[in-house]
Amino acid sequence: MALKSTIFKASLQIADIDHAYYADHLLTLARHPSETDERMMIRLCALALQAHQLQTVCGGDGTLAFGAGLSDPNEPDAWLRDYTGLTRLWIEVGQPEDKPLLKACNKADAVVLYCFSQAAEIWWRGMQAKLARPPNLSVWRIPTSAAQALIPMAQRNMQLQATIQEGVLMLSDGARHVDMEPVRWK
C-alpha cells in the first residue's frame, strides 16, 4: 500500500518591501512521503520570495500555487500561471537533473531554482556548464544553516510572516525567526 502525502496548511503574510508587494496567502502544502520538512519549508520560502511576480508579471490576475513537486517530475514545486493558463514562472527546489530543468525553460517564461543542502556546491560544479545556456533560468543557493533552521517551523497548521528586504527573507512563526539570504549562482 502506497503512503499518502501529509497535508500542511499555511497562512503566509508576505511583506516584500523590495518589490512593494504586500499580501496574505492561504496555502496548502502536500508533503510527499519522501520529502523532508526542510525541503517543504524551502518550497514555502521559494514561493514567498517569488510571490511579488503575481503582481509584477501578471498584474495580480494569475494563480500562484504549489505544483505536484516530487509526486510528478514533470510539474514544478510551485508555479505562477496567468489568466490564460500560460506558465509565467516555474519554481524548482533541490538539485534536479539538467534535462528536466531545460524542459521547464521551454515550458515557462522564467524558471527559478533554489538549491539547498550541503551537497549543493558539488551539484552546481557538475551542472554549471550544462545550465549556462538558458537565459530564462536563474539559480539560487539557500545557505544550509538557514535551511535547517526552518525545520522546527514545519507544523501542520502554520501562521507565518515573511518580510523581504534587501534580498533577505525574514520568516517568523511568532516563536521562531529565521533570516535567509539566498545567493545568486546564475
Image (cartoon, rainbow, N blue to C red):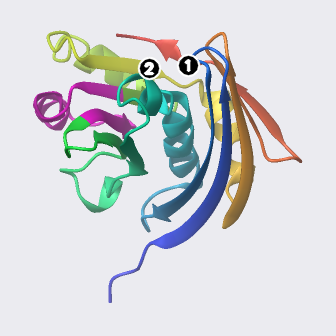
Q: Quadrant of residue 180?
A: top right
140 to 132, vertically: above or below = below
- Describe residue 178's horizontal placement relative to residue 183 as left or right: right
Q: Name the foreground residue: 4 vs 19.
A: 19
Which residue position is annotated with label 2?
140
Q: What amino acid is labelled 1 in the image? A: Pro
Q: Looking at the image, which residue is at 19% across and 40% down?
A: 86
Q: Quadrant of the N terminus?
A: bottom left
Q: Residue at x 35, y 37 (%)?
A: 92
Q: Which residues are magenta?
A: 88-112
Q: Is residue 74 left or right of residue 6?
A: left
63 on left or right of 160: left
Magenta stretch containing residue 59, yes or no?
no
Location of residue 51 with respect to 110 vertically, above or below: below
**What amino acid type should be assigned to the residue bearing mark 2?**
Trp
Does the stretch in magenta take in 108?
yes
Do residues under tags 2 and 1 come within 8 Å of each other at their CB atoms?
A: yes
- Identify the residue at horizontal 54%, vertical 25% (top origin): 142
Query: How far across and how far down the image is residue 94, in percent?
Result: 40, 37
Under circle 1, the secondary element is loop
| Label 2 element class | strand
Circle number at residue 182: 1
Binning the other alpha carbons within 10 Å of mark 1 as few (below 14), some (14 to 19) or many (20 upward) gives: many
